[in-house]
């Protein structure tokens, strides 16, 4: 199945699928994208290459956009994974420098999107802040703002970002962004200013997308996220980009 959706609607990405049932739940609940972990050492949702390829295929069949979520920093290796699995977005979820983004942009098919995570600590600091312009020039299509904890953990921490501290970072961005970090249906009202920023494109959720009993993605939980965060469409201030449409 192939559909195209413009990023004027709030995107919902659920992250950390590991079994086909996760894909089925995400699709049934109205998610747009599913994050598939590979190259995340010790990660609870880590997939081997065969598992990544299988779930990426299942996601495409279900009408979801599969996103490779990785700590890897070798552009040639990453490009090979993209070709082997057919993923259309790559999310660099560690501290890869702008040079890696540039080399990856040159190595990937033109239609493949690159998402670079910006790690915001609980005091509002962002280690990548001085490099934002360099990441943009290197070929980043989309940023993802996520929490870095005081003990150094990154990715699916379940820790919430302070909306007031986020708004201080947003003027530095000339690319659109997704929001992550402890998001839930209940805390949506606190992010009103962020959601109405012209660069906002959607949310990326792991913990709140899961059934607390099974630990798997839950239709009820993902549906609640979709209802709470999709508060209407807005016209992006940033020009539309071919890679920033969901071709699934």
Image (cartoon, rainbow, N blue to C red):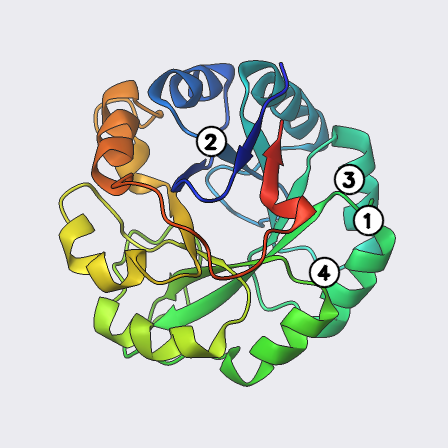
Mark 4 closeness class: few <14, some 14–19, many ≥20 residues within 10 Å: some
Identify residue for label 1.
Answer: 108
- Disc 4 designates what residue? 73
Q: Nearer the viewer, mark 4 or mark 1?
A: 1
The residue under the point 46% across, 40% down is 44
Q: Secondary structure at mark 4?
A: loop
Task: Assign a secondary structure to mark 3.
Answer: helix
> Would you place residue 135 above or below residue 43 in this image?
below
Disc 2 or 1, which lies upstream in sequence? 2
Q: Check if mark 2's residue and mark 4's residue have beta carbons within 8 Å.
A: no
Q: Is residue 85 visible?
A: yes
The label on residue 184 is none
Identify the secondary structure beneath mark 1: loop
Q: CA distance from mark 1 to mark 3?
A: 10 Å
**Horizontal and vertical percent for residue 187?**
16, 51
Q: Is residue 64 above or below residue 89?
A: above
Give yes or no for contact between labels 4 and 1 (Cβ–Cβ under 8 Å). no
**Mark 1: few, some, or many residues within 10 Å (few <14, many ≥20)?**
many
Where the C terminus falls, by quadrant?
Answer: top right
Q: In this view of the protein, which residue sits in the foreground, 34 or 54?
A: 34
Q: Give the mark nearer the N terminus: 2 vs 3.
A: 2
Residue furthest to the bottom in view is 130
Q: Residues within 10 Å of mark 3 (few under 14, many from 20)?
A: some
Residue 123 appears at what percent x and percent y?
A: 28, 79
Secondary structure of the residue carrying tag 2 is loop
Residue at x 30% of width, y 30% of height: 210
List the residue tagged with mark 3.
Answer: 81
Instruction: Locate residue 196 relative to residue 58 in the image: left or right.
Output: left
Q: Which mark is residue 32?
A: 2
């Amino acid at each position: 199945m192939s559909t195209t959706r413009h990023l004027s609607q709030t995107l919902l990405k659920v992250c950390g699928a590991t079994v086909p049932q996760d894909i089925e739940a995400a699709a049934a609940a109205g998610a747009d994208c599913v994050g598939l972990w590979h190259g995340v050492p010790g990660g609870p949702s880590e997939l081997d290459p065969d598992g990544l390829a299988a779930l990426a295929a299942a996601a495409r069949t279900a009408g979801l956009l599969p996103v490779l979520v990785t700590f890897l920093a070798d552009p040639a290796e990453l490009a090979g994974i993209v070709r082997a699995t057919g993923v259309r977005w790559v999310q660099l979820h560690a501290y890869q420098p702008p040079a890696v983004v540039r080399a990856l942009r040159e190595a990937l098919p033109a239609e493949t999107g690159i998402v670079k995570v910006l790690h915001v600590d609980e005091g509002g600091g962002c280690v990548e802040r001085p490099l934002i312009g360099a990441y943009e020039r290197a070929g980043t299509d989309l940023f993802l703002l996520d929490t870095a904890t005081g003990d150094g953990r990154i990715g699916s921490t379940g820790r919430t970002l302070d909306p007031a501290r986020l708004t201080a970072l947003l003027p530095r961005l000339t690319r659109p962004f997704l929001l992550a970090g402890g998001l839930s249906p209940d805390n949506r009202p606190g992010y009103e200013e962020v959601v109405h920023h012209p660069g906002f494109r959607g949310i990326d959720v792991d913990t709140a997308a899961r059934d607390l009993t099974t630990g798997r993605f839950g239709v009820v939980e993902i549906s609640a996220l979709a209802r709470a965060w999709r508060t209407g469409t807005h016209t992006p201030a940033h020009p539309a980009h071919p890679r920033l449409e969901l071709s699934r």
